Image (cartoon, rainbow, N blue to C red):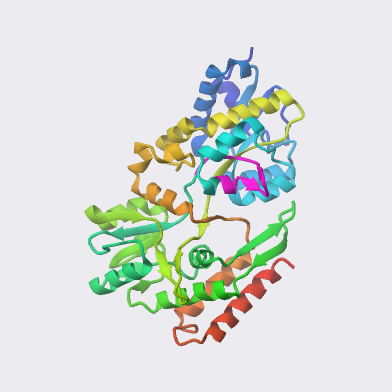
Amino acid sequence: MKKWTAALLAGALGAAVMGMTVSADEIKVWVADNVVSFTQEQIAAFQEANPEYADYEVTVEPVGEGDAAGNMITDVEAGADIFVFAQDQIARLVSAGALEEVAPENQEAVMNENDAGAVGAATVGDILYAYPLTSDNGYFLYYDKSVISDPSTLEGILADCEAAGKNFYMEINSGWYQTAFFFATGAELSYETDDAGNFTACNATYASDEGLTALKKMIELKSSSAFQNGSAVGEATNCAAIVDGTWDSGAAQDLFGENYACAKLPTFEGADGQTYQMSGFGGFKLLGVKPQEDEDKLMACDALAAYLSSKDVQLARYEAVGWGPSNLEAQGSDEVQADTALAALADQLQYTIPQGQYPGDYWTLATSLGDSIISGELSTDSSDDDVMAALQKFQDTCISYAE
């Protein structure tokens, strides 16, 4: 019987880079460097609890979620059997044949036990292809509760900031943050790719009534005396509220002190009189299993993936390295709920759309759109026709990136 010793776990580091394949009685796992030791410990616990899988030699290699998909697509056979990847890579991985569907016996648990955003990120078409691991990449509202009486509406937040002579920060010249407005009203912007990662189609409806409502609200926001463009707490001055992410939670606590508070993004009232919940991009880490010729090995990989993505392991991972759980019970635990920033993000992520792949030029174009508001080229004096013309130009250019 093979033992899962530290030497065996570390012995195959670099195997993928060298183009080595994995035999039927070996399982290779890729995770980020900062969770290698944690993952090794969890695998040892899994082996102890499931001795039927103890004949497999399991190696854990430090390949982060940002690199895993590219490496898998380059050489699926030499890639990991189980790997963590960013949700925006799932379509490429499926097209390249690098992802097995989640085992039928695990699908119900995955769909019922994880938040809807993470499950959506793990799904292509109607097929569940990955095990959700985290729901911790996105943005929400940090605010000073001595200034902001009610963080639920954008209009109320701005009114409180204006009355107190304080600033509200949001980075409207960013393609990441802009989607909070556009996706809220129902405007769409997404891309399709082939297995090589080439953009083949763009689905865009920004030049629409929905897009017009969103862009006009961004213009209205800029007109507030409280508005400042930005998304970094460390660079904010005289700040009472800011749209930012969990990576700045420590800085936000330092800034607001005993008045530190967090909430999901607010709603806003559009020029059409309708109320919209601010949306945006959500980011998730997923755990994938590579297709296997050996059915017994596939069963072992699925069992291990289900364990590594389970509630208890997600909680333990949060306690070890701070990764925010996607598991609903883990999100509701005392430990996570005590993390004010993560609790606010979990609330916000139910309204977001998992970020897919976007051309590099999209981000530059989105910055230009926001800059046209900041500079006053588009203002509250602009006609609807002028605003729609800007949206049409933006949409046409986005579509051109996939032609």
One can see residue 32 in this view? no
Question: Residue 256 placed where, x, y %?
Answer: 26, 57
User: The C terminus appears in which quarter of the rendering?
Assistant: bottom right
**Above/below status of 166 relative to 28:** below
Q: In this view, does 9 lie to the left or right of 341?
A: right
User: The N terminus appears in which quarter of the rendering?
Assistant: top right
Residue 354 covered by magenta stretch: no
Task: Kindly indicate the quadrant of the structure image that contains residue 198.
Answer: bottom right
Residue 133 covered by magenta stretch: yes
One can see residue 10 in this view? yes
Q: Is residue 259 left or right of residue 16?
A: left
Number of marks drawn: 0
Q: Which of 282 and 125 is in front in this view?
A: 125
Question: Residue 109 placed where, x, y %?
Answer: 56, 34
Question: Residue 290 placed where, x, y %?
Answer: 69, 36
Q: As drawn, which residue projects farthest toward the front?
A: 273
Residue stretch rendered in magenta on the structure: 119-134
